[in-house]
Image: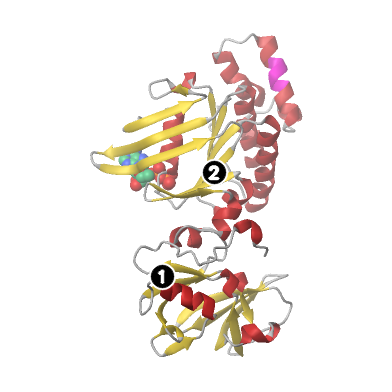
């Protein structure tokens, strides 16, 4: 068993200023957990504390049931993969991959055998005698991965390992890392600022902001059931549209603009004390539709707005328009061509509309609450 437990972790680089605040998390044996969030939110600091490269200001870290706060990085049985590969330039691929084993005083023939095995598993067997400078960026990152695998660690720690690769290689290497770590069943903690990497790679995502965990859950849970406006806005591309509205007995109001909404939702918000309060409405681009494409019941909640810009991406088109003066984007799965200035009637799919408290930005759960599993897109 090689789980990781983080208990009440704080990190202050400067006295009294928390880079990480009261972080609590249990990572199960074999789990692939991705820390994601904007730059400076504390994800690398957390990873470096697990690795032992950074002191912990307060709290406890356990790896495989053992408290490691004061255990030297090299004795934690972890392997790290960084974005800059950190390969030794004067060593061949084989030497780089075997270096950690040599440090552990493993015999040369055993090292050669292990390196060959690993090289085969990641398609590097023909490159073993090359120097890093004779490899592409993707191959170098694979050597770094190979070096990590060869050590047979209890835990993999990866810090933005794909960010130096171009888009195509990034996609390929992403798939390779997923397959490798799943095949090996090694507990992996992966740090990225890229929500697509988080969504596609993680068993569970830990989303952070300003040193705090915002939410922990499966990619599906975070996407369909965000706890707050930050999580809702971070996961998904293009991002969820947000608009501030006042709740009135007639529906939503924003200055001189009004929109009726389904009665069950309105009653629910009023019951929860939001009458005449400001809330943020959130709706994902794929949940905004052309009214003419929907059935009659939805059309009663439609509003008109001109198209400002249409970006055809292939199977879908991103259409920009204003809703009560607020820029919005809809993702339409159509091959239809749109003109700038074209007037359209729009509807929001109220099954997927979120409401956030205007002050706390916490999501207000509508009754009856929808379970992610019961929602299909
Ligand atoms: P992320 O990995 O999410 O981009 P970091 O963990 O690197 O964020 O940083 C978290 C916070 O700690 C940031 O405010 C950053 O400026 C600060 N920080 C990181 N490293 C140091 C350091 N060595 N000294 C002082 N402050 C630091």
Which residue lies at the image location 64% right of the left edge and 23% below the top edge? 150
Observer-nearest residue: 221 or 237?
A: 221
Mark 2 against mark 1, which lies toward the viewer?
1
Which residue lies at the image location 64% right of the left edge and 56% below the top edge? 373
Q: Disc 2 marks which residue?
A: 34
Observer-nearest residue: 37 or 244?
A: 244
Q: Where 361 sits versus 14, above or below?
A: below
Q: CA distance from mark 2 to mark 1?
A: 35 Å
First in sequence: mark 2 or mark 1? 2
What segment carries the magenta color?
Answer: 112-116
Q: For the N terminus, which image quadrant?
A: top right
Q: How many marks?
A: 2
- Is there any visible trace of residue 321 in the rendered image? yes
Q: Residue 36: x, y in percent? A: 50, 48
Question: Which label sits on residue 272?
Answer: 1
Task: Classify residue 248 by image quadrant.
Answer: bottom left
Observer-nearest residue: 342 or 252?
A: 252
Q: Residue 286: x, y in percent? A: 62, 70
Q: For the C terminus, which image quadrant?
A: bottom right
Q: Is residue 338 left or right of residue 88?
A: right
Element type at marker 1?
Answer: loop
Categorize mark 1 by other alpha carbons within 10 Å: few (<14), some (14-19), many (20+).
few
Task: Classify residue 174 by image quadrant.
Answer: top right
Q: Is residue 343 left or right of residue 127?
A: left
Element type at marker 2?
Answer: strand
Question: Which label sits on residue 14?
Answer: none
Q: Does 334 appear in magenta? A: no
Categorize mark 2 by other alpha carbons within 10 Å: few (<14), some (14-19), many (20+).
many
Observer-nearest residue: 257 or 174?
A: 257
- Is there any visible trace of residue 89 in the rendered image? no
Q: Residue 76: x, y in percent? A: 49, 22
Q: Where 91 sits versus 189, above or below?
A: above
């Amino acid at each position: 068993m090689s789980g990781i437990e983080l208990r009440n972790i704080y990190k202050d680089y400067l006295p009294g200023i928390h880079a990480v605040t009261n972080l609590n998390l249990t990572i199960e044996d074999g789990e692939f957990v991705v820390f994601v969030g904007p730059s400076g939110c504390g994800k690398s600091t957390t990873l470096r504390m697990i690795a032992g490269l950074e002191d912990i200001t307060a709290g406890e870290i356990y790896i495989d049931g053992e408290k490691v706060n004061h255990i030297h990085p090299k004795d934690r049985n972890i392997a790290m993969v960084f974005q800059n590969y950190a390969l030794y330039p004067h060593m061949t691929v084989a030497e780089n991959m075997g270096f950690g084993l040599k440090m552990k005083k493993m015999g040369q023939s055993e090292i050669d055998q292990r390196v060959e095995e690993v090289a085969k598993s990641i398609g590097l067997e023909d490159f073993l005698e090359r120097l890093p400078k004779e490899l592409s960026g993707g191959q170098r990152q694979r050597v770094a991965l190979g070096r990590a695998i060869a050590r047979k660690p209890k835990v993999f720690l990866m810090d933005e390992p794909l960010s130096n690769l171009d888009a195509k290689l990034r996609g390929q290497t992403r798939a390779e890392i997923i397959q490798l770590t799943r095949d090996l069943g090694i507990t992996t903690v992966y740090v990225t600022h890229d929500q697509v990497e988080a969504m596609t790679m993680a068993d569970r995502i830990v989303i952070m902001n300003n040193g705090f965990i915002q939410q922990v859950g499966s990619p599906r849970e975070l996407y369909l059931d965000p706890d707050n406006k930050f999580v809702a806005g971070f996961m998904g591309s293009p991002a969820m549209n947000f608009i501030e509205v006042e709740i009135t007995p007639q529906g939503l109001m924003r200055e001189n603009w009004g929109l009726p909404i389904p009665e069950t939702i309105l009653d629910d918000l009023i019951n929860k004390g939001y009458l005449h309060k400001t809330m943020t409405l959130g709706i994902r681009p794929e949940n905004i539709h052309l009214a003419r494409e929907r059935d009659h019941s939805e059309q009663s909640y439609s509003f008109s707005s001109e198209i400002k810009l249409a970006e055809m991406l292939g199977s879908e088109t991103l259409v920009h328009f204003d809703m009560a003066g607020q820029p919005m984007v809809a993702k339409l799965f159509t091959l239809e061509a749109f003109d700038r200035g074209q007037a359209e009637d729009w509807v929001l799919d109220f099954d997927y509309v979120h409401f956030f408290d205007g002050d706390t930005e916490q999501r207000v759960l509508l009754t009856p609450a929808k379970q992610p599993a019961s929602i299909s897109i």
